[in-house]
Amino acid sequence: MRMNIKNHKTLTVVLSAVAIVAVACGVLYSYRTFVAGSAEFSATATSTANASETMTVFADDAEGYSLSLPDDWHIEENATSSIAAYSSSPSAPECKISLSAFPAVADDDRASWIAATIGADPTLAVKEDSSEEVSVDGAPAVRWSGTIDGAPATLVYAFSDAHAYEIAPSSMDGGASSCADALDVFLNGITFTSSVLQ
Amino acid sequence: MRKKIYAMGAAAGFAIIFFFASSRTEAYADNFKLPYAAGQSFVVAQGYDSPPTHVGKDEYALDLTENGCDAYGKAAVAAAGGRVMLAAEEGYNGGYGTEALIVSDGGLVERYAHLIPGTIDVGDESYVTQGEVLGRIGDTGLVAGTACAAHPGTHIHFAVDRIMPDGTYAAYDAEPISGYVDITEGHWYLSDNAPGAVGGNNRGGSEESPGIAPSTPSSTPSVPSSSAPGLVLGASVEATGTAATSSPAAASSSDDGEPCL
């Protein structure tokens, strides 16, 4: 096929423009700006300690909780109201139980809040097997069982006036199911407290 | 004349191909950096495709830490820029504990897990840039380990997921990361992830060893009094092309695998 001179020039101009735009876009796309972040941090968390006596952790000024656990348990605090309790030695725990405190949840919203909390991470595949109403230190609670990303999981959510608490047992050896006894010990050892009353 | 036109057309075609190829590279693999601050060396405590936890969408996950409790409280920094998909300050989160998810251009999601509650410095839906501090490395969620008695299992879990067309998430091989390929359990890796840095480690050579981790971790190795196995204690790391031999007191991955999510 033959092209006349005018078409040749037009084609040349178009192709050249495309090339220039493509290269320019590549350069712009590769360009990045960066923001400096703080590099220092003062860890305020405390080390694990034997749970040899009742330990009180205040979630905030309004209310908190205390734990009374067997001597061979260890408790790890951090800068917030969250804690981790280790049955037996933290080096080889039978079970790790994490407790996280969240703002209070209205009675009618508990079911949806639990679903939203468990599924907050959108990458997780969550499947509920059961959801049972229970009581923790007299407070209404829900014991949730199911699988998360295929792994068995048991989570307990307790609701006090000032907070919602998530209690999560975990174990490398046998999943949450191997923590059943430890979870019962933990739940029996927790007491919700009010600083106002003290 | 016709040859000249053909040549120019070919040049334009190459330019277009180069643009799209470089765009994909920028959005994907070549741009990731290690998720801790430049100048620090961490060891891979648990590497790719290692059960029970680094499977499925975590097949290409890396658990990174230092000796003893050295990693605890250190900054977790963005491996790539993007939008904060989730900043979970509290909670179990399926075993990931306190975590941040960053979604990058191209539909990749980076996970920074087991951070310390209350330390996440970024908010949901905010945008972060590579090297920006996201939070502090901790031990929340499903972790285990003996190296750090005060905070058992301290490490950062870093993984990249690809969002699939059906909305599920699949493992994504993010290498090279800071220029490293074939990242291996038990080896140390030096980060070049500083705000404003570009490109990966210079794999062409450095004073210590060609583009690889230093012979001694940047932090002072600490050896706990306990002799429990774990991330710490005495085991030397095999020298390879991507990581250098550690000092006798430096950490390595333990034989027990230091399992963690």
Image (tube, coloured by chain):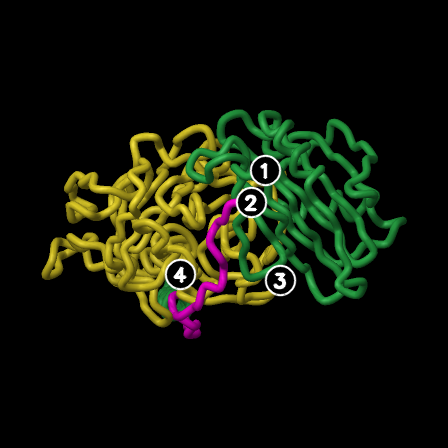
Q: Which of marks 4 and 3 is nearer the N terminus?
A: 4
Q: How far apart are marks 4 and 3 (CA)?
A: 21 Å
List x then y, in percent, for residue A33.
42, 73
Which amino acid, by three-letter code, is at mark 2? Ala
Label 3: state its secondary structure.
loop
Q: Do the residues labelled 4 and 3 touch (CB within 8 Å)?
A: no
State which chain is coloured yellow: B
Identify which residue is drawn at 41% across, 52% down: B28
Q: Which of marks 4 and 2 is in front?
A: 2
Q: How crowded is mark 3: few (under 14 residues within 10 Å), some or many (20 or more)?
A: some
Query: Residue type at mark 1?
Result: Pro
Residue B159 is at least partly visible in this image: yes
Mark yes or no: residue B16 visible.
no
Magenta residues, start to end:
A30-51
Instruction: Estimate the x, y position of residue B47 in percent, counting from the top left.
Output: 35, 38
Magenta stretch secondary structure, dominant: loop
